[in-house]
Image: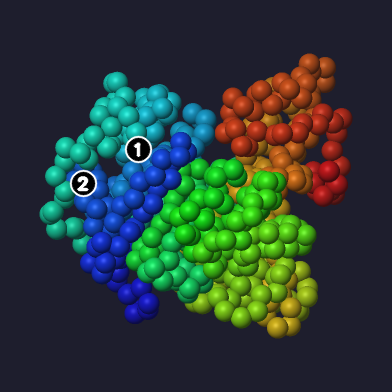
C-alpha cells in the first residue's frame, strides 16, 4: 500500500525538515521563570544526534521501550526525536502519579529504561527497586541525582553525535505508547506507529493550513496527544517553528502569543475561561494568530466574548488519542457552524451509529464511529490487549468511540458527551472507575460512585458519593486524604458526599444519572 505517508518514519520526517531548511527556527522554548531559548533545525539536530548517542551507548535501540517523564522542555523533544531515530519506543508519562500508579504504568508498557525529572527520581527509583521494574535503569533529566547518575544534559554534552547507520526501522512499527484514560479501572496503552506520527503531521498541515513560515504556540503537556499528534508532528512535517511553553500561565499566555508572533495556537476550555478573567488590554486584538485550534466545549456566550475580545476564530474539532488526528473538524476554509464540531476530516469516514453499527437518522443521538486504517490513520491497537483492540477496531475499519453525538442532514456533526465514565477536568481525562476502585478498597467504605459535576473554570470537578460501612467514623476530609495517598492530585475528588445508599437499576448497578 502506498499512501501519503509511504514508508517514511518519524525520524525520516525530522531528517527531511533539517535538510530542507537547516537554518530555519525549529523551537522557541519559554520556561516558567520567563526565560527564552531558540534553536534552528540544524542546532537542534545536533541535540537529537547527541541524545541518540547517549541512548545507543546504553544498548537502547530498535524496539527498546523507554518511558519519558520529563516536563515540557528542549530535553523532552531531544529525547523523543533521538529515540525515534534509533527505533526505540517512547512512552510519555504525565506528572504526579503515585507509586502504585507508576508501578502499573511501567508493568503495562514493559519499559526497560526511564528518563525522569531529577526531583522525581527518588520515587521512580523506589518503585523500580521494590517491584523489580526498569531493568535498564533511570536517567535523570534536569540535574544529577546521587546514587542514580549523571543528568541527561551532561551526558549529551560529553557524548559524540551518533553517526552510525540507523537500524532498518519499519514505518508500520510502533514508535510511541500513549496512555489514555477510559471507562476501565486501568488506563489503556495506545500503540502509535511511525506512520501514525507522519500521517498526523500531514493531517495537521491540512487541518490548520500549516506552512513552513508558521509559528505554532502550545502550552499543552508534552505527554498528551494534543501536543504529540497535532503541534509537534505538524510542525516537523511542515518544517515550521514550535513555540513551546513549559506550562500554561493565564497571566502570560496572550502576551507570549503576541510577542512570539504565533500564527496558530492551541486552546482548551479552561484556558478560554481563565484568559477571559484577565484584565483587558488595548492590544488584545493586535496579534498574528490566524487559526485557533480548540478541543473542548464552552458556552455560546464564552465563545462570543473570547472571539470578540481577542479577534480570533475557533476551529472546533472532535477526536481521541485512538483516532490519531482530530477526525471531525471545522473545515480549514469556508463556513463553520458552532456548536458543530465540524465535518469528517481528510482521510476519515465518520458515522453516528447504534450499538450494532447501524447508522442512525440525521438528528438522532448515537455513538461516534470513525473509519480509517489501523496503524496509519487510526491507532494500531492497545498494547497486549487483543480483546480491547477487537472491541474498538472492527475488521471493516470502523472504530468505536463510545462517545455520543448526532449529525445533521448536511454532514455537520455535533458532540453530546464523552464516554459515560470519563470526567474531563482542565484538559485531563479521568477514569471514574479508577477512583471508585480506590475508594472501595478502603475498609470503611462499603460502596462508591464518582461523577463529574460542572465547574466554572475546570469544565468538570470530580465528585465522589461514598456509602460507609455501619458505624464507620470517616468524614469527607478523611476520604480526600485517603485518595491523596493513592491517586494523582488531579484525580482526587474535590467534592465528597456521604450517602446512606444509592439508586440502582434492575440489575443492581448504581444509576449514576440520578446522582448530582
Q: Residue at x 45, y 40 (%)?
A: 34
Report x, y in % for residue 479: 71, 25
Determine crowd level at label 2: few under 14, some 14-19, many 20+ residues with C-alpha closer than 10 A. Answer: many
State the residue in front, 88 or 303.
303
Q: Is residue 155 above or below residue 506?
A: above
Q: Quadrant of the C terminus?
A: top right
Q: Is residue 128 above or below residue 216?
A: above
Secondary structure type for disc 1: strand
Determine crowd level at label 1: few under 14, some 14-19, many 20+ residues with C-alpha closer than 10 A. Answer: many
Q: Residue at x 33, y 59 (%)?
A: 25
State the residue in front, 419 or 463.
463
Q: Which residue does the numbered mark 1 point to in the structure image?
A: 114
Report x, y in % for residue 440: 69, 31
The mark lying in front, picked from 1 and 2, is: 2
Q: Can residue 125 be seen in this snapshot?
A: yes
Mark 1 and mark 2: span between their CA atoms? 17 Å
Report x, y in % for residue 435: 65, 37
Q: Can residue 238 be seen in this snapshot?
A: no
Q: Is residue 408 above or below residue 150?
A: below
Q: Which disc is residue 50 wearing? A: 2
Q: Which residue is drawn at 48% across and 53% down?
A: 259
Amino acid at each position: 500500500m502506498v499512501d501519503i505517508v509511504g514508508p517514511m518514519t518519524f525520524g525520516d520526517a525530522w531528517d527531511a525538515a533539517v535538510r530542507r531548511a537547516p537554518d530555519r527556527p525549529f523551537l522557541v522554548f519559554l520556561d516558567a521563570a520567563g526565560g527564552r531559548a531558540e534553536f534552528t533545525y540544524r542546532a537542534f539536530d545536533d541535540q537529537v544526534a547527541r541524545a541518540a548517542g547517549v541512548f545507543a551507548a546504553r544498548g537502547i535501540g530498535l524496539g527498546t521501550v523507554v518511558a519519558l517523564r520529563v516536563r515540557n522542555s528542549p530535553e523532552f523533544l531531544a529525547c523523543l526525536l533521538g529515540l525515534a531515530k534509533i527505533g526505540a519506543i517512547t512512552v510519555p508519562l504525565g506528572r504526579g502519579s503515585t507509586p502504585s500508579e507508576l508501578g502499573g504504568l511501567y508493568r503495562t508498557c514493559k519499559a526497560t529504561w526511564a528518563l525522569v525529572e531529577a526531583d522525581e527520581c527518588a520515587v521512580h527509583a523506589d518503585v523500580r527497586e521494590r517491584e523489580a521494574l526498569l531493568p535498564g535503569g533511570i536517567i535523570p533529566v534536569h540535574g544529577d541525582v546521587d546514587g542514580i547518575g549523571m543528568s541527561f544534559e551532561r551526558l549529551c554534552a560529553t557524548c559524540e553525535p551518533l553517526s552510525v547507520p540507523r537500524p532498518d526501522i519499519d514505518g508500520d512499527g510502533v514508535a510511541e505508547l500513549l496512555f489514555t484514560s477510559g471507562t476501565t479501572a486501568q488506563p489503556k496503552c495506545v500503540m502509535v506507529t511511525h506512520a501514525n506520527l507522519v500521517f498526523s503531521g500531514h493531517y495537521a498541515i491540512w487541518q490548520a493550513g500549516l506552512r513552513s513560515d508558521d509559528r505554532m504556540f502550545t502550552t499543552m503537556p508534552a505527554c498528551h496527544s494534543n501536543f504529540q499528534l497535532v503541534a509537534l508532528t505538524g510542525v516537523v512535517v511542515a518544517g515550521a517553528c514550535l513555540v513551546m511553553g513549559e506550562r500554561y500561565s493565564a497571566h502570560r499566555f496572550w502576551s507570549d502569543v503576541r510577542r512570539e508572533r504565533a500564527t496558530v495556537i492551541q486552546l482548551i476550555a479552561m484556558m478560554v475561561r481563565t484568559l477571559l478573567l484577565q484584565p483587558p488590554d488595548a492590544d488584545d486584538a493586535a496579534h498574528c494568530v490566524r487559526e485557533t485550534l480548540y478541543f473542548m466545549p464552552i458556552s455560546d456566550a464564552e465563545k462570543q466574548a473570547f472571539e470578540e475580545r481577542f479577534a480570533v476564530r475557533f476551529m472546533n474539532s472532535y477526536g481521541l488519542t485512538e483516532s490519531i488526528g482530530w477526525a471531525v473538524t471545522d473545515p480549514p476554509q469556508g463556513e463553520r457552524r458552532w456548536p458543530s464540531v465540524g465535518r469528517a476530516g481528510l482521510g476519515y469516514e465518520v458515522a453516528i451509529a447504534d450499538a450494532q453499527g447501524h447508522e442512525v437518522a440525521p438528528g438522532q443521538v448515537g455513538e461516534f464511529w470513525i473509519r480509517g486504517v489501523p496503524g496509519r490513520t487510526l491507532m494500531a491497537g492497545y498494547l497486549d490487549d487483543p480483546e480491547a483492540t477487537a472491541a474498538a477496531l472492527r475488521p471493516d475499519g470502523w472504530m468505536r468511540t463510545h462517545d455520543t453525538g448526532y449529525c445533521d442532514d448536511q454532514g455537520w456533526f455535533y458532540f453530546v458527551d464523552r464516554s459515560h465514565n470519563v470526567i474531563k477536568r482542565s484538559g485531563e481525562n479521568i477514569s471514574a472507575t479508577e477512583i471508585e476502585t480506590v475508594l472501595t478498597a478502603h475498609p470503611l467504605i462499603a460502596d462508591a460512585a464518582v461523577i463529574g459535576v460542572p465547574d466554572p473554570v475546570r469544565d468538570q470537578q470530580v465528585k465522589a458519593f461514598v456509602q460507609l460501612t455501619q458505624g464507620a467514623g470517616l468524614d469527607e476530609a478523611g476520604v480526600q486524604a485517603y485518595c491523596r495517598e493513592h491517586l494523582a492530585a488531579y484525580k482526587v475528588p474535590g467534592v465528597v458526599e456521604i450517602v446512606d445508599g444509592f439508586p440502582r437499576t434492575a440489575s443492581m448497578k448504581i444509576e449514576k444519572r440520578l446522582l448530582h
